[in-house]
């Protein structure tokens, strides 16, 4: 009996490793898709913001969830909509981004507090957190790396270098960026073995 118990612990560890690798591979793939198709990503994320706001309105009309949770969710979706105006450029130091992040934390706290006091099925709680709280911020998180491959323009809001050389300024700023895709690329190169391609 003890041997089977130890075997189940090893099995759980192996399953956790596989799930972690699958999530990392999925994030890497999504980050590459967002970087390749930024216009389509903006379209999908914008409609996700609209759908999530509609769900909050539906919860106000049809469910007895507290009004403050849904109003906070609507404010959060409004901030996400403002962030989508400049997509794929997401400035993490902007007031809108910081406010959206703060409302996300407050929304989580209020939702945890409410669902801790009032009983709901686990599937209903998970549905609220997944659709109303996590979908849009997760999509924005994955799309943060799309900004790295946007071509520079002379109409950028950040000041360029003194010599007004757009390409030099872009490359100097690009080398200092840290994105989700660059992190996964580094992890892939350092962890996974690489095969040498033979030239024929």
Image (tube, rainbow, N blue to C red):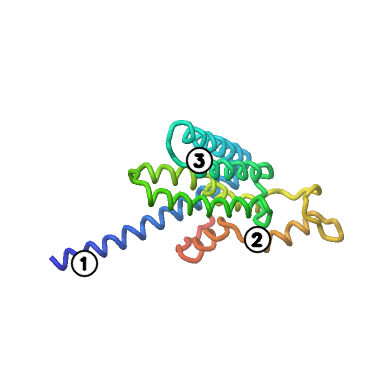
Q: Is residue 151 left or right of residue 124?
A: right
**Camera-nearest label, 2 or 3:** 3
**Mark 1 vs 3, N-terminal side:** 1
Q: Which residue is mark 1?
A: 6
In space, the residues marked 2 and 3 are separated at their CA atoms by: 40 Å
Residue 111 point in image, percent of width and height: 45, 49
Secondary structure of the residue carrying tag 2 is loop
Residue at the left extreme of this rendering? 1
Mark 1 vs mark 2, CA separation in Å: 44 Å
> Which callout, 1 or 2, points at the residue further toward the start of the chain?
1
Q: Dot 2 surroundings within 10 Å: few (below 14), some, or many (20 or more)?
A: few
Task: State the image coordinates of residue 17 (x, y, percent, origin top left).
Answer: 36, 60
Q: Measuring 50% from the left and 49% from the top, which residue is drawn there? A: 29
Which tag, 2 or 3, sits closer to the chain's start?
3
Find numbered disc 1 in the image and state the secondary structure of the residue it sits on: helix
In contact (CB < 8 Å): disc 2 and disc 3: no
Q: Is residue 99 above or below residue 127?
A: below
The residue carrying mark 3 is: 67
């Amino acid at each position: 009996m003890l041997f089977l118990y130890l075997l189940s612990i090893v099995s759980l560890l192996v399953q956790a490793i596989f799930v972690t690798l699958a999530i990392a591979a999925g994030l890497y793939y999504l980050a590459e898709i967002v970087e390749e198709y930024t216009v389509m990503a903006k379209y999908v994320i914008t409609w996700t913001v609209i759908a999530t706001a509609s769900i909050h309105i539906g919860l106000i009309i049809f469910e007895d969830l507290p009004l403050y949770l849904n109003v906070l969710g609507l404010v959060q979706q409004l901030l996400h909509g403002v962030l989508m105006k400049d997509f794929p450029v997401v400035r993490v130091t902007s007031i809108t981004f910081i406010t959206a992040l703060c409302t996300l934390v407050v929304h989580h706290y209020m939702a945890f507090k409410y669902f801790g006091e009032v009983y709901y099925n686990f599937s209903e709680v998970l549905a609220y957190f997944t659709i109303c709280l996590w979908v849009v911020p997760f999509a924005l998180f994955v799309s943060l790396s799309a900004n790295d491959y946007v071509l520079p323009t002379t109409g950028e809001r950040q000041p360029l270098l003194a010599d007004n050389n757009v390409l030099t300024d872009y490359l100097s700023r690009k080398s200092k960026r840290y994105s989700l895709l660059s992190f996964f690329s580094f992890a892939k190169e350092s962890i996974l073995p690489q095969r040498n391609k033979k030239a024929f």
